[in-house]
Image (tube, rainbow, N blue to C red):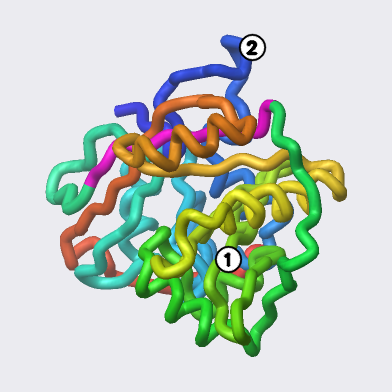
Amino acid sequence: MSVIAGADGDDRTGTGAAPHVLDNPALAALTGPHARFAERRGRVLRYPADVSPWLALPDEPDAQDWADLAALAGPGAEVPLPGFRGEVPDGWEITFRIEGVQLVDDSLAAAPDAEAVRLGPTDVPEMLDLVARTRPGPFLPRTIELGSYLGIRREGALVAMAGERLRPPGWTEISAVCTDPAFRGEGLATRLILAVAHGIRERGETPFLHTGAQNTNAIRLYESLGFRLRRHTAFAAARFPERLAHDRTAVPVA
């Protein structure tokens, strides 16, 4: 079996050859700019559970890698497999799968926004509340440590936000884009995307993002802003046999 975590062979980079860091963005991030977050067993890496659900299998995981994944996560846990489109080994069960897309900055009119404020640790309770009400995707108590997050407040209340998540070398993912339903239609998400993109470009990196393939309204918005579709991907989760989880030791990557 050959499985590429975070890739499905749809190469839109124009090279048609060597793997791109965005084909397995979690692996590239956890062995690069985000190495300080990495928990590891064998060749399997993940973020701490309160930072991000993203984890990274090798491009072609073998039986030992799947056993290490089981041991790393713990007995009976549901394991997120972002980008996974292959077959799981015998005894594993796919519990969730949706199609997704990856888009990259092609012609964004990135610019700072005068109303956007930098969010910090003291803002996390409000951020978690906004995410719970709008469901843009995973945002956890320590996700804010992954990069810069910007928000817009009205009468003191946080009503929109966006920020940075995965950081493969040379790239940064824009994530957690959300707006309070009472303030939708004002273009706040667009302004924050462009402001976050500006900060990414300022340090010489390129913005990218992921969303569900069925989220056609969001895809249209992103493409209108200057993102282009790079590739189709998938988001999955699986549950593994408890007999494989004999040792859940995780060691930080040096």
In the image, taking residue 237 as reference, residue 144 lies left or right, namely: right
Say whether residue 8 is visible. yes
Residue 101 position in % (x across, y down): 42, 34
Q: Earlier in the sequence, mark 2 or mark 1?
A: 2
Q: Would residue 50 be counted in the magenta stretch?
A: no
Residue 98 on the magenta segment? yes
Q: Circle 1 sits on which residue? A: 161
The residue lying toward the viewer, choosing from 74 and 207, is 207
Q: Which residues are magenta?
A: 97-106
Q: How far apart, in angstroms, are the residues tagged by discs 2 and 1?
A: 35 Å
Q: Mark 2 against mark 1, which lies toward the viewer? A: 1
Say which amino acid is labelled 2.
Thr
Look at the picture and state if 26 lies above or below 6: below
Name which quarter of the figure residue 30 lies in: bottom right
Which residue is pictured at 16% across the width and 60% down the height? 241
Q: What type is the residue that disc 1 sits on?
A: Met
40 or 229, which is in the foreground?
Answer: 229
* Residue 194 locus on image (x, y percent): 69, 48
Residue at x-position 31% and y-position 59%: 79
Q: Which residue is mark 2?
A: 15
Q: Main secondary structure of the magenta part?
A: strand
User: 111 and 96: which one is in front?
Assistant: 111
Q: Secondary structure at mark 1?
A: strand
